[in-house]
Amino acid sequence: MLLIFQDKISLRSKYIFNFFFTDMYGIGYKLTQNKDEFNLYQGPKINYSNEEFENELNIKPFGLLHEIGIREQNIPIGNWNNEITLFKNNPGEEIPFDLFSATFYLITRYEEYLPHITDMHNRFEADSSIAFQHQFLHKPIVNYWLINFKKCLLNHFPQLQFKNQTYSYISTIDIDNAYAFKQKGVMRTIGGYGRSVVNFFWEDFAERTKVLLGKLKDPYDTYEKQLEIQKKYKINVIYFFLLGDYGINDKNLPSNNKKFQSLIKHLNDYAEVGIHPSYGSNDNYNQVKKEINRLSTIVHRDIFKSRQHFLKLKFPSTYKTLIENGITDDYTMGYATNLGFRASVCTPYFWYDLDTETETTLKIHPFPIMEATLRFYMKEKPEHAMQHILPIVNEVKKVDGELITLWHNESLSNWREWKGWQNLYEEVVRLAQRK
């Protein structure tokens, strides 16, 4: 049992100690405000206070974990074992920064509660983050702190027993648009033909006709290829289905389409499924509930996993809506515009709601890699994609984290804007599935 002395115990400190010692290290701990108890204790112990204790492992608090509410923070930057640190406040000491406040700030996404500029989809922008500004967006810095702190603890208390961390890989695939031409219905099909004629897209006109006549496979129908790869490499896969009402940014098939339902059931035979709450459902409890119920009805089971369409994540409303609708695991924590670690961590963790100062039951699964980031935001060529992906994969492997990649069915199509990208998914799977 690890004993931690605090002169002031808070909900924030309990949360971050749970993350460090219970979730990540598998070590039992106890908090105390009693100096005599701390002094007399013969087992492993940490002083996290401004009190002075001789010959103890001391971490000086910066104050963030004792606060209530949200305000702009002055964050001194430092260095520890060649890793950047936040909340530097104890230079020259064994741990020269408030490790716990720094981790809390990053994984709660504290900065996203503060006033900030958003993009056209009302999303927090990566270049507004402290990780981008101090050039550690491509590194799961929290995991490195955890590793260095573990070494420090073992140096002081070699009797401590830590649980083993093991690297894992999960492939996630978003189904935003199940088919390019098939099953669109009469009005959408007529509209598609009309656009082809008006814009002189005769190749598009011909392809649509061949697909509808059964002479050509729909370009977005890459599902058997996906299943072949998944079977070949024995990987864990989660499909997220968009089942929202039709809108300018929600253009999947109607949820009552029998062919679409058959596809969902087919993929559910080989992988897990989750809901992809629509663009139009953001901050709309009833719409999210409706979409979850649609998927649950199709697969005949409860739905617990989700990822927001367009990665529309707004704190704290998005996560509150998910929790109220029974979601236990969310996979939205990543940027559309940049590869890297939005929460500076590559292991799952429970969300802490700064608005109510509450540790919740919603588990966050961060992802650092999305193929659409490379194609549409970085404007990268497919032959150069791996030079950006490989360093990210290696970072997760180094810290025995959970690597999650985000793909879409259309990117395996070798069609239109995805010409030349069809083999990247298997390359990444091959790289990611082995340690």
Image (cartoon, rainbow, N blue to C red):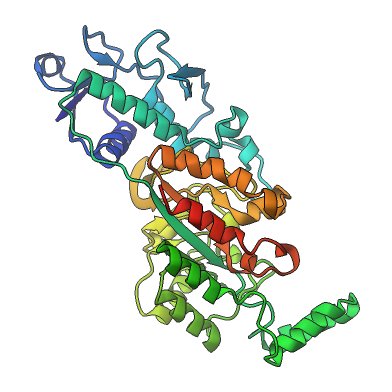
Relative placement, left or right, of 135 versus 196 is left
The quadrant the N terminus occupies is top left
Answer above or below: position of 233 versus 433. Answer: below
- The reply to whether residue 6 is in sight is no
Answer above or below: position of 80 versus 178. Answer: above
Q: Nearer the viewer, residue 176 or 166?
A: 166
The image quadrant that residue 4 belongs to is top left
Q: Nearer the viewer, residue 320 or 25?
A: 25
The image quadrant that residue 45 belongs to is top left
Looking at this view, name the residue that lies furthest to the bottom: 213
Residue found at x 59% / y 74%: 222
Residue found at x 63% / y 36%: 128
Residue found at x 50% / y 57%: 429
Q: Nearer the viewer, residue 350 or 284?
A: 350
In the image, residue 337 lies at what x, y percent? 65, 47
Count how many numbered circles sit on residues in the image.
0
